[in-house]
Image: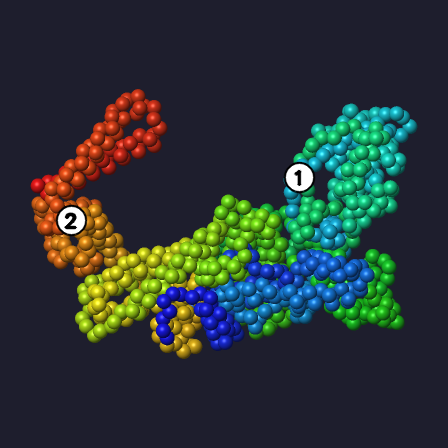
Amino acid sequence: MMIPAQFNAKEVEQKWYDYWMKNDYFTSKPDHRTPYTIVIPPPNVTGVLHMGHMLNNTIQDVLIRRARLKGFNACWVPGTDHASIATEAKVVAKLKEEGINKNDLTREEFLKHAWEWTDKYGGTILEQLKQLGCSCDWSRTKFTMDDDMSASVIHSFVDLYNKGLIYRGYRMVNWDPEAKTTLSDEEVIFEERQGKLYFIKYKIEGSEDFLTVATTRPETIFGDTAICINPNDERFAHLKGKKAIVPICGRVIPIIEDDYVDVEFGTGCLKVTPAHDTNDKTLGDKHNLEIIDIFNEDATLNSFGMHYQGKDRFVVREEIAKELEEKGALAKTEIHLNKVGTSERTKAVIEPRLSDQWFLSMEELVKPAIKAVLESDDSSEQRTGQSQIKLYPSRFNNTYAHWLNNIRDWNISRQLWWGQQIPAYYFGDGKEDFVVAENIEKALELAKVKTANESLTTADLRQDADALDTWFSSWLWPMAVFGGVLNPESEDFKYYYPTNDLVTGPDILFFWVARMIIAGYEYAGEKPFSNVYLTGLVRDKQGRKMSKSLGNSPEPLGLIEKFGADGVRVGLLLSASAGNDILFDEELCNQGKGFSNKIWNAFKLIKGWEVADIAQPESSKVAIEWYEAKLQQTLAEIEDNFDKYRLSDALMAIYKLVWDDFCSWLLEMIKPGYQQPIDRATFDKAIEMLENNLKLLHPFMPFLTEEIWHHIAERSPEQALIVGEWPTAKAYNEQLITDFDFATEVISGIRTIRKDKNIPFRDVIELRVMNNEKASTYFDSVIMKLGNVVDLMYVGEKVDGALSYRVKSNEYFIPITGNIDVEAEVAKLTEELNYTKGFLRSVQGKLSNEKFVAGAPEQVIANERKKEADALAKIAMIEQSLAGLK
């Protein structure tokens, strides 16, 4: 194939992705090899690619491609999540635009619209991932509402119910009035907001006296059923046994006593609204108080709100404050900061609400999950002293521990239609008149037994209208995608489970990661994965979280269009250390694109050389021996970084190997002279080293590397780079690398003198060496080639009439030829000597000043002493150079 002058990412990306797909490289089936498995954190079915997805999925692709090269049976399972709240909200909004109210539809009619929406917009993000180069096994693509996935969820619910772990309870829950559903505690985000504290006066029944209560929510007075005082608060001893009158509604309520009331907070009197506050509900139960729910499901006031009926709670808050003031019942208001619970999905302010809901008891379920991450595996079979599941970075262990050790029962029911419908079937009006079964036919049999009524039919049963929490579906993900919930003996499940690595964000450590671990131990008796790599957030270069509202989030596909997928992947990963946020700048992607061009040009340079059957120069033999050692050293560093999930460091090690060691040094050392051929032995080794570089780069830059791989030689599908072989680690000579580092300083010294003295590289020079360091002479042939040295000799004394420099204690002399104006060089060095001596006097003047030395910080004194030492060394070097010229 003809090699294009430039690397064209757009043409190459589509070509090779099609090639990989055509040859089925991504597909995995159980075989004799060791499996390496990743399950994708399923994005919302209607989602589109954003920068967080780009980072997360690039990391997963790097891990899966490397595993493939290392000979594992690599399986990356893709899929999407039905995202019940988010998707239902979008479908409801779409119907509203069409003039259709969800409440006017049957469940079946609504679900038809939801499936149409999903079929139209779902899966877009998976197609976009292909443009990034993601090598998922697309034949295994799963959706959490697929028939088998839903069956797994229902099976899990029934199983847990039969074990006594799922129960129905009338509890205070988090109510999202926008989505009109309950939320689990983990789906509530608490934000600090500035509001007001309202001081409301309640008259004491049968007198003109009043008490004052402070509240942030004056609209809830319609649900007040008591005033509570602390029995030990002497200020209110005269109120014991009396009653108060709620302003506006005029309802008479008791004044109760409980030491729950904090005498230091507010006024010391507490209004008790059991239907709308968790703590008030506890007090209400204790004192047998009436419960009055004043809100509709959309957080407008109901008939208990009197003339405010139908108005939104926040509108009422403003209006009732005015009415209270007009009636003389508002003592004052104050600015008040408090924590407000908001919905993670809709951002609506959460309303505490009493409701019949389904809960999963977590106390026992959570214990194996705590042990798996936080305790060492010291079983009799395997005493590793390590936890079974490792979080990277490990600082998240504390976060994980805090949540699991303080876990509450999980509210798993949602007042939604989009999702798996709860498999509970009611046969009567009582709260306990239900059975739980996987389908209505099984439910009928159970209902007949429970009622002792053989004449029951399915028409007598009605299924619970609620759907299950989305996370109750996705917590089964690593098992369900392999059929392990329904059939634990399935070949796929036994082969691929447990999976190896999970790559996700710390924001769903509780929602998803911990729950998958809990489910894994409950259903499979073992961990769902061994390692969890927690990525950071992608922020803009000012450190702000990326968002549409700020307009600071670049279009991912636009970045790929501009910089190429490989460039974007490199740009993201170079700064993506585990768990740390990325300050994203497009310049990072430009750097990635520049790296692509550097590799392409290096490849073109090698392929452009004429090859001949001639003797191999000593300098080339030495150079190749060094590079092979350097590659092995870097390979060991890369492997260590991968073991510690430091992918950014692994990429940087490869970046330096290719850019500095391969392009800047090796190619220069083996490059043939102008219009001269290269010997075949060196050329073959250069290709071999290039191929090894491509293997190391492939997980990070799959398109560029596959393109070059096939330009190097004609390759069959079995010889494609994607299924190549990762370089083998071998013993290497570390001293060779150390000696070369010394040689590079020698070469740099020659280049500096050539530049400073305007000696063209085409002009040969001689080099004399006083080898005080007893440095290796192994790289002398390389020094001669890269310095264009015609004669290199080791001497026992200084060389007169020569330019000189030092590398450590070694001295290097370049005898002066007719190309150098000795007189001008002496004048230049004399001027530099005088300037440096003046600088030294200035520094020594400071250091001899006792007042300065006594008063200056220690670091300042240390800096001045370093300046003194550097100046003395420079003066000695200049004087030595002058002596050689005279």
Q: Is 419 drawn above or below residue 807 in the view shown?
A: below
Judging depth in this view, the residue of 170 and 599 nearest the camera is 599
Kindly indicate the quadrant of the structure image that contains residue 225.
top right
Query: Which amino acid is tagged 2?
Result: Tyr
Q: Quadrant of the N terminus?
A: bottom left
Judging depth in this view, the residue of 199 and 54 nearest the camera is 54
Residue that carries the numbered disc 1 in the rendered image: 193
Judging depth in this view, the residue of 102 and 873 nearest the camera is 102
Residue at image x 28%, y 71%?
684
The residues tagged by marks 2 and 1 sit, at their Cα atoms, a distance apart of 71 Å
Q: Is residue 631 visible?
A: yes
- Is residue 384 found left or right of 200 in the rendered image? left
Q: Position of residue 482 (x, y in %)?
A: 59, 69
Residue at image x 66%, y 67%?
120
Judging depth in this view, the residue of 144 and 85 nearest the camera is 85
Query: Which amino acid is tagged 1?
Result: Arg
Q: Position of residue 751 (x, y in %)?
A: 22, 51
- Is residue 872 found left or right of 498 in the rendered image? left
Q: Position of residue 170 (x, y in %)?
A: 78, 51
Residue that carries the numbered disc 2 in the rendered image: 812
Q: Quadrant of the C terminus?
A: top left
Q: Residues within 10 Å of mark 1 (few under 14, many from 20)?
A: few
Q: Position of residue 387 (x, y in %)?
A: 51, 55
